[in-house]
């Protein structure tokens, strides 16, 4: 296994997580529109935070995520949208990661096209997800790792608090998946509807 190829695959997956997180925060209106700028990534115009505090927070998350992806310790990256008024979990975006034990043949252009498709699906999801209104919302990032992974002190081990959405009014949408030579990523969103 080539360490260079594994590093490239890990960077691609972590970049996808970072831009998906930014896109979700923007599309769902968690922060004001003026806190974001448009940049080019994955050969697409992408949304990225422009607020120093938000950017620093996301970058600190991504530094550790990159390490876990490279060491094949990450199993799931989750973004939970939470109502500030009653602390209800409103949406749960899941990114399941499977690490391949062997390098598989995969064209980088094909992988980029798969990522483009998912980013477009995330962007278009606002057409069917319930409008977030009459409340302020925040988000929480959860990472599921191999049980033998040591957790840095900057991170809180929630010991299974998965912030699963509960109730009869829950729906789930699975998006297209993508794979690199070393990783396979599935993306989905669960949400409460009225």
Image (spheres, rainbow, N blue to C red):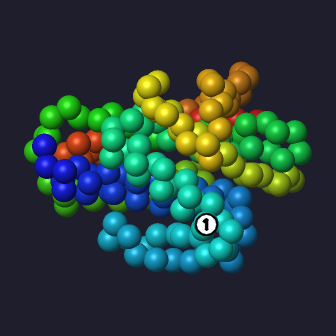
Residue 86 lies, in percent from the top left, at: 87, 39
* Residue 51 vertical position relative to residue 150 in the rendered view, above or below: below
Question: Taking 94 as reference, is 162 left or right?
Answer: right
* Residue 4 vertical position relative to residue 77 in the rendered view, above or below: below
Quadrant occupied by the C terminus: top right
Seen at 15% across and 35% down, the residue is 102
Q: Which element is circle 1 on?
A: helix
Quadrant occupied by the N terminus: top left
Q: Which quadrant holds residue 99?
A: top left
Residue 45 lies, in percent from the top left, at: 43, 73
Label 1 neighbour load within 10 Å: few <14, some 14-19, many 20+? few
Q: Taking the image as drawn, is residue 82 in sight?
A: yes
Seen at 74% across and 52% down, the residue is 138
Where is mark 1, residue-wise? 56
Q: Nearer the viewer, residue 69 or 186?
A: 69
Seen at 66% across and 74% down, the residue is 51
């Amino acid at each position: 296994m080539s360490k260079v190829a594994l590093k490239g695959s890990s960077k691609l997956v972590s970049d996808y997580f970072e831009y998906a997180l930014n896109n979700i925060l923007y599309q769902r209106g968690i922060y004001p529109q003026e806190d974001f700028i448009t940049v080019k990534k994955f050969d697409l115009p992408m949304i990225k935070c422009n607020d120093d505090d938000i950017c620093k927070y996301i970058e600190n998350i991504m530094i550790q995520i990159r390490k876990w992806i490279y060491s094949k310790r990450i199993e799931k990256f989750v973004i939970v949208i939470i109502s500030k008024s009653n602390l209800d979990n409103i949406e749960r975006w899941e990114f399941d990661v499977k690490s391949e034990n062997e390098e598989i043949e995969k064209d980088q252009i094909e992988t980029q096209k798969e990522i483009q498709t998912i980013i477009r699906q995330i962007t278009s999801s606002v057409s069917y997800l319930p409008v977030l209104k009459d409340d302020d919302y925040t988000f929480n990032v959860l990472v599921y790792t191999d049980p033998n992974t040591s957790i840095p002190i900057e991170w809180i081990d929630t010991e299974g608090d998965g912030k699963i959405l509960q109730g009869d009014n829950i729906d789930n949408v699975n998006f297209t998946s993508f794979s690199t030579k070393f990783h396979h990523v599935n993306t989905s969103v669960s949400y409460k509807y009225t």
